[in-house]
């Protein structure tokens, strides 16, 4: 096991030992100390901490009248908006489970999640999302207008479902999060109040968040990164959340320039599109108040990191996590910024092992990353077999990711994520890690971002690259392949390069590699 490094120093950032039992209680200190301070901001609407507390209390009362009980599941078909936060805190007050789902999912996915979760009530943030409103109309939901929440839709109670048992301590389930990019049966991660409070406290400490901070909240709150790392940690610190339903580079740029935003969270694809926007004639990136740009959710490319830092003037920090860990596992440190694309050392409280063939690897070698700590999930809902496969009897979660740990003298034990163990491409007997090829392709000035997958062929496996170009640029696959020959070993050069107008991605910007693998397996892959 590897010991985690210490928390940032300073009396204001010592981890609290008196964390509450439920996530709605994280705002109570600020309701007492600064009830009029802004908690949520959206499109000109400002909700103070006092108003947020009152709205959550009223929403809990109304949900109770509608039949929501402790242990029931409330499924929220949503895009970022004030009602999402209010209803999340209301569920916590009732010991109900929040099940946030992105409104831009398909009809089939929404219906599957409603059925699998056994939702007692389904809520739709129709005021900010046409897709949510369409789902609401299809499912016969009624329009309501609650104090502090505004207009949204909700279904009548499903009286056929039974509540789950309620647990008095922090092991009570707070949220049920469906993992992205999965296929087959739904995979729903049960996260407890203890899990989420651990992440909220780590985020408060490691980013040194205070009530002076203003956090731009564009990552979907239906995703664990947006819910816990971005939103709960900010509210826990008494900071303000600037809620944005969707990522629009121009809107982000305007908020950075004039909105006094101090912390920005995003996946690399978002930062890449923001940087590309700033390069267009007449545009500029200006962020006078920004003190933290935080990346995560997907691999970070070195050339892109360098370009962004040069354009914005601050470090682009990196992190690593997964839904099953609530999500944070590793994080670069504010007082020790990295020039490389490491995800940083494990966060305080998290232990790690790097394993190959059932044994810990030698220092510096690549193996599967296993983690243990307060953020590890309770399990997969209605799937005990899958839970046992993912988490062993000693509490070690197998992430399925390949990693190595820095071993240089004087280093901080930072982790480097090499790739998914299932994504490793074996070409002519050589191991090809997609991240390495993606970083080389992304360093081309005409490329916004890319994704590399494997494709089975008789007796071998091929490397296939899907590439999204900077708008208005032209780059032939043959020219890109020739350019890569100067930067990669021959066996790492993609056999096929396909140019796409947009890479398929989730609402968080995470590239849907399963979809790309299906495309690569078909007959439509372009020859280079």
Image (cartoon, helix red, strand yellow):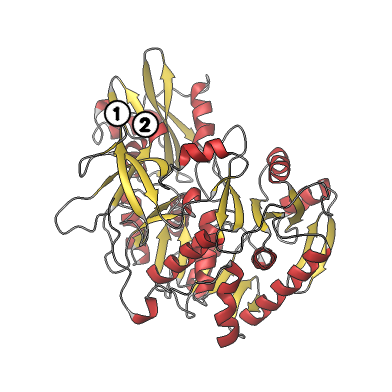
- For residue 21, side relative to residue 109 (left or right): left
Front-most of 141 and 467?
141
Q: Are marks 2 and 1 in contact (CB under 8 Å)?
A: yes
| Residue bearing mark 1 | 431
Residue 67 visible in the current orientation = yes
Residue 282 visible in the current orientation = no
Choose the circle earlier in sequence order: 2 or 1.
2
Q: Is residue 332 above or below residue 416?
A: below
| Residue bearing mark 2 | 424
Q: Is residue 479 above or below residue 7?
A: above
- Which residue occupies 38% across, 41% down? 401
SS class, disc 2:
loop
Q: Is residue 496 above or below residue 287?
A: above
Front-most of 272 and 49?
49
Q: Residue furthest left?
A: 409
Looking at the rendering, which quadrant does residue 146 occupy?
Answer: bottom right
SS class, disc 1:
strand
Measuring from the top left, give residue 274's x and y in whole percent.
Answer: 47, 57
- Which residue occupies 75% across, 73% down? 58
Measuring from the top left, give residue 502's x and y in whole percent.
Answer: 53, 41
Report how far apart the C-alphas of labels 2 and 1 lie in the structure. 7 Å
């Amino acid at each position: 096991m590897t010991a985690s490094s210490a928390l940032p120093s300073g009396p204001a950032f010592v981890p609290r030992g008196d964390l509450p039992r439920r996530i709605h209680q994280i705002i109570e200190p600020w309701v007492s100390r600064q009830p009029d301070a802004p908690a949520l901001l959206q499109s000109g609407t400002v909700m103070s901490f006092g108003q947020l507390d009152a709205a959550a209390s009223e929403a809990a009362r109304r949900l109770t009248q509608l039949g929501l009980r402790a242990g029931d599941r409330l499924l929220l078909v949503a895009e970022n908006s004030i009602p999402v936060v209010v209803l999340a805190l209301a569920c916590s007050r009732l010991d109900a489970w929040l099940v946030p789902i992105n409104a831009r999912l398909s009809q089939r996915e929404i219906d599957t999640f409603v059925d699998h979760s056994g939702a007692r009530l389904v809520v739709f943030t129709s005021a900010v999302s046409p897709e949510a409103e369409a789902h609401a109309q299809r499912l016969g939901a009624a329009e309501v207008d609650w104090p502090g929440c505004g207009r949204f839709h909700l279904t009548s109670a499903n009286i056929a479902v039974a509540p789950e048992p309620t647990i008095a301590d922090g092991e009570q389930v707070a949220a049920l999060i469906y993992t992205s990019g999965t296929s087959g049966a739904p995979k729903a991660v049960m996260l407890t109040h203890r899990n989420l409070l651990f992440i909220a406290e780590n985020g408060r400490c490691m980013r040194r968040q205070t009530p002076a901070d203003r956090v731009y909240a564009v990552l979907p709150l239906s995703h664990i990164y947006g819910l816990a790392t971005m939103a709960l940690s900010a509210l826990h610190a008494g900071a303000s959340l600037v809620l944005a339903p969707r990522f629009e580079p121009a809107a982000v740029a305007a908020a950075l320039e004039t909105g006094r935003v101090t912390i920005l969270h995003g996946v690399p694809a978002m930062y890449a599109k923001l940087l590309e926007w700033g390069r267009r004639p007449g545009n500029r990136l200006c962020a006078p108040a920004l003190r933290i740009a935080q990346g995560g959710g997907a691999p970070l490319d070195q050339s892109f990191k360098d370009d962004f830092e040069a354009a914005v003037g601050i470090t682009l920090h990196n992190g690593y996590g997964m839904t099953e860990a609530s999500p944070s596992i590793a994080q670069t440190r504010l007082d020790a910024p990295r020039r490389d694309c490491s995800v940083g050392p494990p966060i305080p409280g998290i232990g790690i092992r790097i394993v190959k063939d059932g044994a810990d690897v030698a220092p510096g070698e690549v193996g599967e990353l296993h983690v243990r700590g307060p953020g590890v999930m309770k399990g997969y809902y209605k799937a005990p077999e899958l839970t046992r496969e993912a988490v062993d009897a000693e509490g070690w979660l197998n992430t399925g990711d390949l990693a190595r740990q820095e071993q240089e003298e004087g280093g901080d034990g930072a982790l480097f994520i090499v790739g998914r163990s299932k994504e490793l491409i074996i070409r002519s007997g050589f191991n090809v890690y997609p991240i390495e090829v993606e970083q080389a392709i992304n360093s081309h000035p005409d490329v916004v971002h890319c994704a590399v997958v494997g494709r089975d062929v008789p007796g071998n496996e091929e490397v296939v690259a899907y590439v999204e170009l900077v708008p208005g640029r032209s780059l032939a696959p043959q020219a890109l392949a020739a350019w890569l020959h100067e930067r990669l070993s021959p066996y790492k050069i993609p056999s096929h390069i396909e140019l796409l107008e947009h890479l398929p991605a989730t609402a968080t910007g995470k590239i849907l590699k399963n979809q790309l693998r299906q495309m690569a397996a078909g007959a439509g892959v372009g020859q280079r």
